[in-house]
Amino acid sequence: MAEKVTPRSEDFSRWYTDVVQRAELADYSPVRGSMVIRPYGYGLWENLQAALDGMFKDTGHQNAYFPLFIPHSFMQREAEHVEGFSPELALVTHGGGKELEEPLVVRPTSETIINAMYAKWIKSYRDLPVLINQWANVVRWEMRTRLFLRTTEFLWQEGHTAHETEEEAQQETRQMLDIYARLAEEWAATPVIRGRKSEAEKFAGAVDTYAIEALMGDRKALQAGTSHYLGQNFAKAFEIQFLDRNNELRHPYQTSWGASTRLVGMIVMAHGDDQGLILPPRIAPHEVVVVPIARSDADERHSVVAAADRVRNEMVDTGVRAILDDRAEVTPGFKFNEWEMKGVPVRVELGPRDLAGDQAVLARRDQPGREGKQAAPLAGLGETVRRVLDEVQNALFRRALAFQEENSHRPGSYGEMKEILADTGGFQYAGWCGSAACEQAVKDDTQATIRVIPFDQPDDPGVCIACGEKAADEVVFAKAY
RNA sequence: CGGGCUGUGGCGCAGUUUGGCAGCGCACCUGCUUUGGGAGCAGGGGGUCGCCGGUUCAAAUCCGGCCAGCCCGACCA
């Protein structure tokens, strides 16, 4: 591996594909539209999973697992749900050498099977709330696919909850969106806009869909997590009923929420540069790589590698995820480039000159070349590195936030918005009257869609950017993944 | 599904026009020398040239058919 990638500025799309493959996050599989997540990419996903799972547990959720196959008829019980998913379903028609009585759907999401079970489990208000999450794979037969961003099969988590009251369910929906926002900002160092989706963009079957949107390096938006308030739509379709405190039969109010391996793509596109990945320390598989530098002289080699091993161990003891790259068959220069491609936040270089001076050289991935290098005493190196890692984490977030701010516009007219969208892109904050016609007209004309109706609203949203009527809300238009 | 392109060691390609020993770069293996920003030299392994048929003394190359993949337009975490 480890040759140059297509420069980001030249062709962002190719740069992305190159980086994902060269950094060994993923590779194409023999099946069109699907991919293999390689150990390094999976390690990144596991860290995201662990962060999310911890937050889910902290808020009272439990994990469970529901089956991959769903009876076809289940998909058809909720009218809008059918509408939304039928074109992208994978159907199993044969099993055990025979044609099946009823085809099975490979889950595109588990709403229907889970709600069919909830109908059995929920009988009383005492059974509520039900707070279940599952980690699973799902399949959606997409036309155009891209590594991590849109593949036929992908990994995600889907939470499905049922509540006694509307308020409680609404609160749950917002709480989970907030968890996604925290994951993006505090762990993945990627600032997001929190808001509600328009009718056209919401999940089929939901009353309201909320989402977080992040801005990628090419100034396109990426939806990084969604949380749906489902009302009683699925409860009615699947006849979930409970006896309330007044002995009256009622349908529960529900939510569902999900985030996927797409987050890996987000991290690549939010932080990466021409040298490859740049990973935020909190979710990086390796926070630090120690590279010993030694000539072939056997004694020198041994003493340098032994010292490098001690440095690694000290960092592990300090709670830093550190590895030692003691391969003898490649040069230090090769290793520098390789670990930069893989986005390791901090590199520790240790050679004979350093040992003589009881120091090591620290190189920050977020600052290129000499600029990011500093010498640090071997004594207390673990603590020093811990501090530098925190600085890198913060610097990445600040840089991404500054980029988002620079690329957030408030165009004064439709013409101006169209021009900005065509020239540079980014988030366009603009008034919207709320009509689907205006939304569609902008999409047809500019390819930009309403990403979210932000929770943070100005006192006066002004006028609709498309029709000039009084605006109902300020919304964010952007071209999106 | 409509339009454009491509199928040759693992990857990227040349060779096809004008038929004549299947080649190059990277990667891989072995050895020696190297190692502070992608090491050098020497040796080596690996290909039914997408598939089927035809023409010919001879086909990666010419002819016919088929298949697969990529890119661009209608769906989407």
Image (cartoon, grey):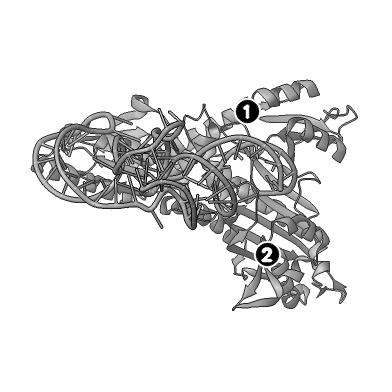
Nearest the eye: B35 or A75 = A75
Task: Looking at this view, name the residue that lies furthest to the right.
Answer: A469
Say which amino acid is labelled 2: Ser
Residue A206: x percent and y percent?
78, 55
Q: Which mark is residue A110?
A: 2
In the image, taking residue A459 as reference, residue A85 lies left or right, namely left
Left or right: A101 with respect to A367?
right
| Residue A412 position by quadrant | top right
Q: Chain of mark 2?
A: A
Q: Residues within 10 Å of mark 1 (few under 14, many from 20)?
A: some
The C terminus of chain A, quarter of image:
top right
- The residues tagged by marks 2 and 1 sit, at their Cα atoms, a distance apart of 37 Å
**Percent x, y of residue A203:** 75, 52
Q: In this rendering, is residue A91 above or below A382?
A: below
Task: Identify the residue shown where x is 36% and y is 50%.
Answer: A319
Residue A177 x %, y %: 67, 50
Q: Is residue A359 visible?
A: yes
| Drawn side of residue A295 relative to residue A230, left or right | left
Query: Of discs 2 and 1, which sits in the foreground?
Result: 2
Q: Amino acid at mark 1?
A: Glu
Q: Secondary structure at mark 1?
A: helix
Instruction: Please tell me which residue lies in front, A111 or A62.
Output: A111
Image location of residue A301, percent across then percent down: 14, 42
**Residue picked out by circle 1:** A405
